[in-house]
Amino acid sequence: MSDLVRTGRCLCRAVRFETRGEPRFISNCHCESCRRAASAPSVTWAGFTDAQVTLTGDTLRSFASSPGVRRFFCGACGSPIAFRGEAWAGETHIPVCAFDAPETMAPASDHFENERLPWAALLGRAHA
């Protein structure tokens, strides 16, 4: 595992996280659940193994957004912090824009393109 350590936080700074090593992937998700959870046309996630991620903060809360899925957020400011799902057992996905240096974490792919809003762009392509 790489010695690379990345840090991040919620908007109010009450919840913080740290990741160690390289992410397994960085991808834009266009699914309706992610769009609604973030109030955005897509969410860019960095996926890590659970062992690579440490979440801290007294205001950390979670919500079962669908069967087998938990979304973690700050109970004070509402910022999305993490995603864990049975379909990706053993992984924690962190929204790239919650990291302290998101500009260093460009996505390499798009997921759930079939749920993409018609006006939202795909990676490397103008919207249709």
Image (tube, rainbow, N blue to C red):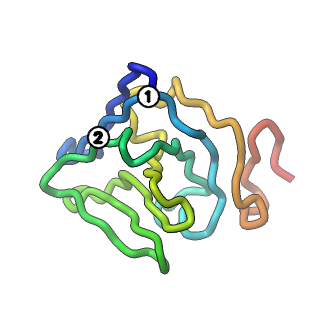
The three-letter code of the residue at mark 1 reads Gly
User: For the view shown, which residue lies furthest in the top direction?
Assistant: 3
Residue 65's label in the rendered image is none
Location of residue 75 in the rendering, given as x and y in whole percent from the top left corner: 22, 62
**103 relative to 52, above or below:** above
Residue 28 position within the rendered picture, expressed as x and y whole percent measured from the top left:
63, 48
Point out the residue furthest to the bottom here. Answer: 67
Q: Nearer the viewer, residue 93 or 114?
A: 93
Residue 17 has which mark?
2
Task: Say if 31 sits above or below 53 in the image.
Answer: below
The residue most toward the left is: 58
**Location of residue 88 by image quarter:** bottom right
Q: Secondary structure at mark 1?
A: loop
Which quadrant of the view contains residue 24?
A: top right
Q: Residue at x 39, y 41 (%)?
A: 98
As drawn, is 80 to the left or to the right of 126?
Answer: left
> 61 or 117: which is nearer to us?
61
Point out residue 103 in the picture as x, y percentages from the top left corner: 51, 26
Q: How many marks?
A: 2
The front one of 108 and 97 is 108
Instruction: Identify the disc placed on residue 21.
Output: 1
**Dot 2 amino acid type:** Phe
Question: Which residue is found at the position 26% from the left and 56% from the top?
Answer: 74
Query: Mark 2 to mark 1: distance in Å?
Result: 13 Å
Q: Residue at x 45, y 26 (%)?
A: 1
